[in-house]
Image (cartoon, rainbow, N blue to C red):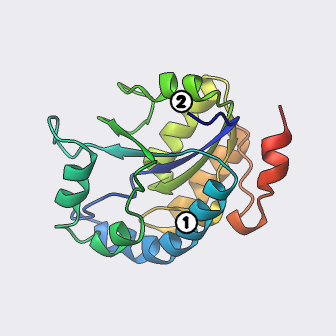
């Protein structure tokens, strides 16, 4: 297992989006998925592990591939097809909003030697925010590229980013401006 002080979390990108407000989330997620796909490629080139952190959608006995296939049946299929996990990506299934609540995420991050997280995905005002809060309370340094996080509304997303900058001291530098070499050098 490659050691890196940083990991990229992709939160709830595998999503049916078949709920009230899902159409708005899809509209915002489609262009973001293109940016995130490029950013994911760039992080992997630097040896940064990628961890999908995803709702289980009530599929308690299913694995990552089955969750992906089930979610492809929903409105979110175009986003999912852009962001299919690679074989070497990790996939953590969560039961609630935070990627840390009821999951093995913190154990995995410790095994990988990670002290810094880059949070991306949907929804900025719920799951990214709650995961960010959980990460902050566990002592992780946070980068949350503002161009790789979306919510149902742009206003809600911007409010969540403001909260994350102010309350959990997240750096929200856009993905194309984030200096990964500098991030990896910092202890």
| Residue linked to disc 2 | 134
Left or right: 140, with 89 as reference point: right
SS assignment at label 2: helix
**Residue at position x 61%, y 24% in the image:** 137
Residue 95 lies, in percent from the top left, at 29, 35
Tell which tag, 1 or 2, sits nearer the viewer. 1
Dot 1, how many residues are within 10 Å of its Cα: few (below 14), some (14-19), or many (20+)?
many
Which of disc 2 and disc 1 is earlier in sequence? 1
Instruction: Please report contact status of discs 1 and 2: CB closer than 8 Å, yes or no.
Output: no
**In the rendered view of the protein, which quadrant contains the C terminus?**
top right
- Residue pushed farthest front? 1
| Residue linked to disc 1 | 36
Q: CA distance from mark 1 to mark 2?
A: 22 Å
Residue 23 lies, in percent from the top left, at 30, 74
Residue 155 lies, in percent from the top left, at 54, 65
**In the rendered view of the protein, which quadrant contains the N terminus?**
top right
**Residue at position x 74%, y 49% in the image:** 171
**Residue at position x 53%, y 30% in the image:** 134
Left or right: 166, with 26 as reference point: right
Which quarter of the picture shows residue 166? top right
SS assignment at label 1: helix
Which quarter of the picture shows residue 13? bottom left
Dot 2, how many residues are within 10 Å of its Cα: few (below 14), some (14-19), or many (20+)?
some
Residue 112 lies, in percent from the top left, at 59, 29
**Residue at position x 59%, y 56% in the image:** 159
Image position of 115 with respect to 166: above or below: above
Q: Please tell me which residue lies in front, 55 or 61.
A: 61
């Amino acid at each position: 297992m490659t050691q890196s002080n940083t990991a990229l979390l992709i939160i709830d990108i595998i999503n049916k989006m078949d709920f009230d407000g899902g159409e708005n989330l899809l509209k915002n997620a489609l262009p973001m998925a293109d940016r995130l796909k490029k950013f994911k490629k760039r992080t992997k080139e630097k040896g940064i592990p990628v961890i999908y952190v995803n709702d289980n959608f009530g599929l308690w006995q299913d694995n990552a591939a089955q969750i992906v296939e089930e979610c492809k049946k929903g409105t979110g299929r175009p986003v999912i097809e852009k962001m299919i996990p690679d074989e070497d990506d990790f996939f953590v299934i969560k039961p609630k909003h935070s990627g840390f609540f009821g999951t093995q995420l913190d154990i995995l991050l410790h095994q990988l030697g990670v002290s810094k997280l880059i949070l991306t995905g949907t929804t900025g005002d719920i799951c990214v925010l709650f995961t960010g809060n959980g990460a902050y309370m566990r002592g992780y340094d946070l980068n949350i590229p503002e161009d790789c996080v979306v919510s149902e509304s742009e206003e809600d997303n911007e409010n969540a980013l403001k909260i994350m900058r102010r309350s959990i001291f997240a750096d929200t530098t856009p993905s194309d401006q984030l200096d990964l070499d500098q991030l990896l050098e910092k202890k």
